[in-house]
Amino acid sequence: MKTSDFDFELPERLIAQYPSPERGQSRLMVMNRKTGSLEHRMVGDLPSIVESGTVMVFNNSRVRKARIFGVSEKTGSLAEFLLLKKLDSHCWQIMAKRTKRIKSGNRYIFDDAIGEILSVSEGRADGRSDGILYLRFDKPIDDAWLDIHGQVPLPPYIKRPQKRAQKQGQADDAERYQTVYAREYGSSAAPTAGLHFTRELLAELNNAGIETVFITLHVGLGTFLPVRAENIEDHRMHEETFFIDEDIACCIEKAKREGRKILAVGTTSVRTLESAWTVNGELQRGEGNTSIFIYPGYEFKVVDTMFTNFHTPESTLLMLVSAFAGRDFILHSYMEAIKEGYRFFSYGDACLIQ
């Protein structure tokens, strides 16, 4: 299949620049992939929509304040960096704007720390750079330091100063670009489907006989890189780390044996579950790594229902939901969402694909 097969035109006005006034008040498109029907509801209706006995699987990864700014010792210019993965106490894998201007040995001042570029990524087989750099600091850099000196790494399609949200009566991004159940630090972007859930909604789901369990996948570089290959089969995902607790694995396996549905909240939960499912019909326990790329033709082994946001054109996330529900149905549903004025992407509305 071609990457262009997953393109669509989205009016810029529908790209959500702010979250809903209150968490959990977004619209919900219920998409039935068997009948092709679409229903317009609200996220708060989920307890009455989801079948009792369903196990809902959430990703509890916590977003780092991984966006930092450094001043070049050589030129005095300001450079923006995104910390992706901690390699040791001093060294991080990073991405940067205007990568071509950054060379090995360049040094940058970050408030009370100095960082030096160790090396530039050797790039990809097609000769293009994937934008990966390595930065070593002169002191340990951890999440406590980032909480003070870093910023929440909002996606590039949110085009407004982060502090402007508070001035316009909106909640701070540091709070709203984080799920209420976020626990395990490690992501460079939020698992955004989970942003819709409040503690009250989680309690209502449990009261309706729906189990809620939590796994971890730390969102990394794959979220940020576009599909550059003409044929989607040639695209390669970067590796991300996940963790599944023993009790959670047993709960999901039990539900599968009993014929109860597994509802994955977000594509990160989908990728974790499908990666961890073994040929023996069990989930891998503990820590693992995945570079799974799900696109049409993939046969799902664990996930029966999916709750997710509306995704960007030609993205791996759009290809994943197309694998689940069919490309034509997904694109038809997206056209209906555009017609009905749904808000798209991280701070936008949601869909439930049954």
Image: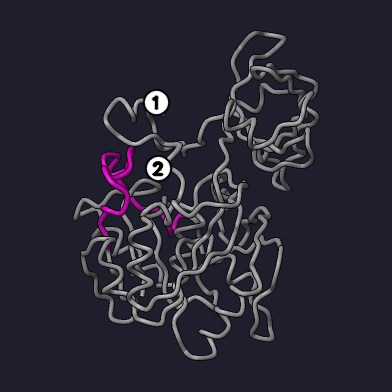
Q: Which residues are magenta?
A: 4-28
Residue 146 coordinates in the image, percent (x, y): 61, 32
- Please give the residue where the numbered disc 1 appears in the rendered image: 163
Residue 336 colored magenta? Answer: no
Residue 22 colored magenta? Answer: yes
| Scheme of colours in the image | one colour
- Up the image or down, 343 lies above or below 204; here it is above
Circle 2: element type: helix
Residue at x 40%, y 61% (from the top left corner)? 308
Which badge, 1 or 2, comes first in the chain's sequence? Answer: 1
- The Cα atoms of the two marked residues, 1 and 2, are separated by 13 Å
Residue at x 31%, y 47% (from the top left corner)? 10
Residue 89: quadrant of the picture: top right
Side (left or right) of 84 relative to 135: left
Residue at x 59%, y 59% (from the top left corner)? 216
Please tell me which residue lies in front, 87 or 175. 175
Please tell me which residue lies in front, 267 or 120. 267
Quadrant including the C terminus = bottom left
Q: Which mark is residue 176?
A: 2
User: Residue type at mark 2?
Assistant: Arg
Residue 48: quadrant of the picture: bottom left
Residue 238 coordinates in the image, percent (x, y): 66, 52
Circle 1: element type: loop
Side (left or right) of 346 relative to 108: left
Side (left or right) of 303 relative to 90: left
User: Residue type at mark 1?
Assistant: Lys
The residue carrying pointer 1 sits among few (fewer than 14), some (14 to 19) or many (20 or more) residues within 10 Å by Cα, namely: few
